[in-house]
Amino acid sequence: MKFCSQCGSNAVTFSIPKGDDRPRHLCSNCGAIHYINPRVIVGVLPYLNDRVMLCKRAIEPRQGLWTLPAGFMENGESSEEGALRESWEEARASIRVDGLYSVYDIPYINQVYLMYRGELTDTNFAPGPESLEVELFREEDVPWPEIAFPIMHKTLKHYFEDSKQGRYQLHRGVISRKLKL
């Protein structure tokens, strides 16, 4: 950050504000402290009977690989509203949310993922502008080597394990650079 977004001054410095414990961008003109916080990604694990819905990405990063519908939460929406919006944008899917299913922190890229589990209310889904294809998969048909992101891989694995037990629990964790799938 070079300029203060509050007053337009170019005298932004990176130092520890009084009473804080870490460096922040500070405006020497108006005194604004600019906090840069993790980005929240919200999404849904859509299911219908024994199948889950995946989207083949039409955009980078990881274009051409499969993922659950998810994306950045927008200002002015709840995490659940954002997850449903992403499902509509990526897969034109109508979903009834069952509840929060997984929460993963990814500190090395400053992201927090909130994934919901939700039942498709119909099969009238189709690729949105960010997807090449949208399909329903049984566990044995999931293209595991082509799953775009580690968080999606973990969430899918948890779902199929929970399905076999007939009980769904909240999964939480931290994903590091050293994650092995």
Image (cartoon, rainbow, N blue to C red):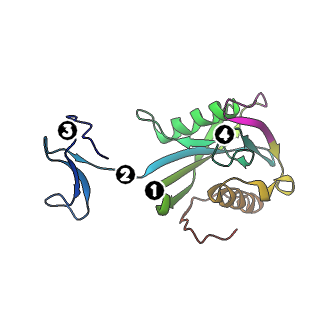
Q: Quadrant of residue 53?
A: top right
- Going from the N terminus, do you reach mark 4 or mark 1 first? 4
- Going from the N terminus, do you reach mark 2 or mark 1 first? 2
Residue under circle 3? 9
- Going from the N terminus, do you reach mark 2 or mark 3 first? 3
| Mark 4 → mark 1, Cα distance in angstroms | 21 Å
Tell me the magenta residue range: 123-135
Tag 3: residue type? Answer: Ser
| Mark 1 → mark 3, Cα distance in angstroms | 27 Å
- Residue at point 77%, 61% (across, down): 164
Residue under circle 2? 37
Instruction: Say which element carries label 2.
Output: loop
Instruction: Say which element carries label 1.
Output: loop
Residue under circle 1? 110
- Going from the N terminus, do you reach mark 1 or mark 3 first? 3
Callout 3: 10 Å neighbours few (<14), some, many (20+)? some
